[in-house]
Amino acid sequence: MPTADRETVTGLPPGIADAREELTPMLSQYADLCAAHEDALVLFQVGDFYEAFCEAAAAVARVCEVTLTERSDSTGDYPMAGIPIDNAAPYLESLLNAGYRVALGDQVEDAEQASGLVDRAVTEVITPGTVVEDELLEAGTTNYVAAVAGGGGEGTDGTAPAAVGLAAVDVSTGECLVTSGDRDAVAEELDRIAPAELIAEPDAPAFEPSDAERGWTTHAYDPGAFERQAAAERLEPYLPAPDRRFDGDAELRAAGAVLAYAEYTQGDDGPLSYVTRIRRYDPRDRLRLDAAAQRSLELFENRGLGASDTLFDALDETSCALGRRCLERWLRRPLVDADAIRSRHDAVGELADRTLVREALGDALSAAYDLERLVGRISRGRADARDLRSLHATLAVVPELKATLAGADGEDVDDGSADRPRTDHLRDLRDRLDELTAVRELIDDAIAANPPPEITEGGVIREGFDGDLDDLRATEREGREWVADLEASERERTGIDSLSVGHNQVHGYYIEVTDANLDRVPDDYRRRQTLKNSERYYTPELKEREEEIVGAAERADALEYELFVDVRERVASETERIQDLADAIAELDALRSLATVAVEGDYVRPEIADDPDAGVEIEGGRHPVVERAEESFVPNDADLPRGSIAVITGPNMSGKSTYMRSVALAVVLAQTGSFVPAQAASLPVFDRLFTRVGASDDIAGGQSTFMREMSELTEILHDAGTDSLVLLDEVGRGTATTDGRAIARAAAEFIHDELGATALFATHYHDLTDLAEERERAFNLHFTATREDGDVTFLHRVVPGASSSSYGVEVAELAGVPAPVVDRSRDLVAAETGDAAVSDAEGRDTETDGPDPAADGDQGDDADASLREFLAEGDEREEAESADASAATDSDPANDGDPQTDQPTSSATDLTAALRDLDLARMTPIEALNALHDLQSRVDDDR
Ligand SMILES: Nc1ncnc2c1ncn2[C@@H]1O[C@H](COP(=O)(O)OP(=O)(O)OP(=O)(O)O)[C@@H](O)[C@H]1O
C-alpha cells in the first residue's frame, strides 16, 4: 500500500497547488496533468528530460539519487529534479520499486512546429504490473496486474461469503486470465499468478502476499470501474456478450476493472487490441499448489541453496523466451486431466527419442524472439523497425521448424522402427505452426535489413518498396552527388586549390575560400558567413540544389514514417494469428526442454494410472534438484497405496525431507507433462498437493512460526481429500514437545481416518510409529545411519519399519557446535540415559521402536529417549540395535517380563510361537538376520 510519504507526492504537489493562480503557462500545464493523475507521480517532458517539481521533485531526487535543482521564473522559485529521457529506464525502475505509479507527461507536438507552449499529455502510466518497456521487464517471464472483486457478505446471517472474482492481465503480451472462487482459492491463485500489482475494490477482502519477498504492490483504483454495468461495457470490445462468458458477477467485474486499469495505464487510448483472448478457467482444472507448497518444494525459489537451485531451473532447457514463459506457466499449473498429461508425455517421449530432431529444433528455436511481447508492441503502435525485423526473423524460423518436425518422420528413432507414427501432440503442434507468409514477405519487402532505432528519421524502408519514396531518395542522392562533385569542379573553375565545400546545421551548404584567395572568387558567389581567416559563400545553383536535397529528404523521411506505420498496422491486423503461432512455438520449446532434461537427467516416463484407487509407485526415485548437487545421490523407492500414511523416522540429516519432496516433485513433474527422475514410476493423478514443513525450515518472517505452521495445517485438515497428496514435515516442532506430539498424532489420525488423503509424515516423535499398528493404511519407513569411531555416516536409504535414533548430538557436532557444548550435551544425555536404565530395571520396555504408550506424558521427548538408548549402547551399529529391539519386544508373549530374567526357552512350541510372531513385513533384513540368530542361539543353548 502506498505510504503516507508517497501520498504527499502523487498528484498535485502542494508547492505547485499553493502557487496555482500565478503559475507560468508551462507549470500550469504540469499542474493540470498532476491534478488529472492523483495517484501517480507525474514526470513532465521538458526537452530531453522528464522533470518533476516541488515535493514531487524532492521525491524523485531522493528515490533516483539525482540532484535537486531549482527553476526560477517570474512567479517564483520551484525545486526541480529531472531524469534523462534517453536513459530513463533505471530511474523508472527505482520509482516503481519504491512503490510509485509514474505518469509520463510527454510532449505530443513537435516543439519546432508549436506556436507557443508545446502540447503535452500523459501517454502512459507506468505501474509495476503494467510496464511494457523491455528494459523494465525480465526476459521470458510474465508480469501481471491482477484485480479482485466481490467476496462481500462474509459471516452475515449464516450466508456463505460471495465468490471472489480474480482477473489478471499481462499488458506486455496481452494474456488475460479470469477465475473465481472462495477467498482461500483466490488467495492461492494469486500466489500462483504472483502478480506484480494488485488492484482491489474497496470492500474486497484484503489479500496480502503470503511471501513478503516476492509480494505485489497493492494499489487503489477507481471503484466505478468495478461496477457491473461499467465492467460489462468495458469488456464488450474484447468479447461479445460478456455477461454470458463468465461465471458470476464477480468475475465479470474483476475482468472489466483490470482491463479498465490496463487501458488507463496505456494512455487511455481505447481497448487494447492485442488482448484477443480472455481465458476463463476454474482453479479445479489444475493441480492446486498453494504458496506454501510452491515454496517448500522450491519450485521457483530456493532460500537455502543458490537462487537457481529450483525445480524450474532444473527443467529449463528452453531456447527462447516464449518457451521459458510457457514452461513456467505449466509448472505453476500442472494438469489434472490424465489424457492431457499422457499427451504431453507422448510428445516429450517422441522428442526424447529423436535426438537429431530435438537438437535441430533447439538450434532453430534459439533464433526466435519474444513474439508475445513483440506483438504487444506492434498492436500498441510502439514497435520500431527493429521490432518488425525481429518478428521477421522469428517467422523465418517457422518453415525450418515445420520441416524438422515433418521430415524426420521416425527415421532416427532409437528403437529402429522406421515407421513409428508421430504422436498426435506433435502433429497438432506442427499444424499450428502458421508460416504467416504474407506477413513475412511484407516485412521483408518493406523494412530495411538493419534499420535504425528511430522511425522518423528515414532509413527504415527498403528500396524498391515504394516508387514515390524511391524517387525522393533518388533526388536526394543525385543532389548530394552533385554537391560532392562541386568541390572539384569549383577548384577547377576558380583555380583555388584550397577551396572546400562543407555543410553545417545553421547555414547549410557553403563554399569556403581562405582570405588569401578572395581575389579569385567568381561573381556568382554570394557571401554567407565571414570567419577569422576565410569567407563562406553559396551560389544560386548550390542553394537550389540544397533546397531540393533538404526538401526531398524531409518528404522522404515523412513518407517513410507513413509507410512504416502502415506496414505496422497491416502486421497488427494479424495479431491473433501471430499470438497463435507464439503459443505453438512456446509449447514446442517447452516440450523440447522437458525432453532434453529427460534424456540428460536420465528421467523415465511415468505411467499415469487410470484406476481411481491407484497409489504412488516409484522405483529408484531421485530428487531432481538435490541430485544435481550431490555427487552420489541414493535413489529410493516409494510405494504409497492410495489413502495410506507413511510415517518416516530417522536421524537428523538422514534424508527424510528430501525423500518426501522427491515423491511430491515426481507428482508435480508428471502432471506438468515431464518425465520423472526415477527408474520406473506409476502415479495417479492428484488434484491438490499440500505441504507443511517444520517451522524452522521455513521462516518467512512476520507471523509467529508456530502460528504459521498451524494455519497451514488447518488448511490441510479442512481441504485435503482422497485425491490429495499431503507432505507433513515435523509438524508440531514449533511448540512444547507434549503439545507438538499430541497435535502431530491427532493430525495424522485425522488425515488417515477422516480425509483419506495419501500422506507422508516425517517426524522425530517416535511414538507416531505406533500408528502403523493401530491403523490399517498406516506404515513406517525409516532412514538409517551408521556410526563408527564416533563418526556418523548417513546412508540416505529408506527402509521399512521405524527408526530409533536421532543422532542429534552428532549432527550438532558435525555442524560445528563448539566442543565444550557437544561434550556437555553428551554428559547430560548420558546422565539421563542412566535414569532411563533405572526405568528399564523397573521393567519398562525401552527398546521398542516407539515408546510405551502407557509411559506417554512422563517420559519427555521420545526422540531424546531413543537417542539416549543409542548413546548408552556405545558405538554399535544402529541396525544391530534396532534388530535387538525387535527381537526383544516382538510381542512374544513369553517375552513380556524382564528381559534379563526371561531367558530363551527351547521348547518347540515356544520357538514356533516366537517364529510366528516375527513381523517380517516390518523388519529390515538385518533385523531379520539378528532375530534368526537369536532363535538359533536359543536352540544352541538348549543342546
Ligand atoms: N537420497 C540421498 N542421497 C544423497 N544425499 C542425500 C539424499 N537425501 C538427502 N541427502 C543429503 O542429506 C541432506 C539432508 O537431507 P534432509 O534434509 O532430507 O534430511 P532430514 O532427515 O529431513 O533432516 P532433519 O530431520 O534434520 O530435517 C540433504 O541436504 C542432502 O544433501
Image (cartoon, helix red, strand yellow):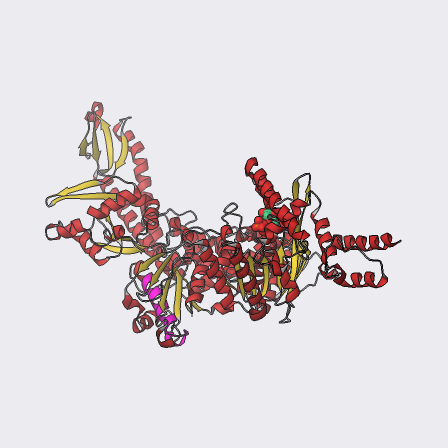
Percent of width and height locating residue 579:
45, 62
Q: Is residue 556 left or right of residue 931?
A: left
Q: Is residue 81 left or right of residue 478?
A: left
Percent of width and height locating residue 39:
26, 57
Answer yes or no: is residue 892 visible.
yes
Answer yes or no: is residue 444 visible.
no
Q: Is residue 795 magenta?
A: no
Helix, strand or loop for the magenta stretch, by majority: helix
> Does 749 sit above or below residue 538?
below
As rendered, which of 585 and 349 lies closer to the eye?
A: 349
Q: Is residue 230 left or right of residue 424?
A: left
As rendered, which of 241 and 413 lies closer to the eye?
A: 241
Percent of width and height locating residue 422:
64, 64
Image quadrant occupied by the N terminus: bottom left
Which residue is rendered at x = 28% and y = 56% of the image? 123
The magenta stretch spans which residues?
Answer: 242-261
> Does 214 sit above or below residue 485?
below
Q: Is residue 246 magenta?
A: yes
Q: Is residue 539 left or right of residue 279?
A: left
> Does 765 sit above or below residue 280?
above
Q: Quadrant of residue 82?
A: top left
As rendered, which of 192 and 614 lies closer to the eye?
A: 614
Q: Farthest residue in the top direction?
A: 516
> Does 771 sit above or below residue 537?
below
Q: Farthest residue in the right direction?
A: 943
As rendered, which of 126 and 174 lies closer to the eye?
A: 126
Image mark count: 0
Percent of width and height locating residue 93:
35, 48
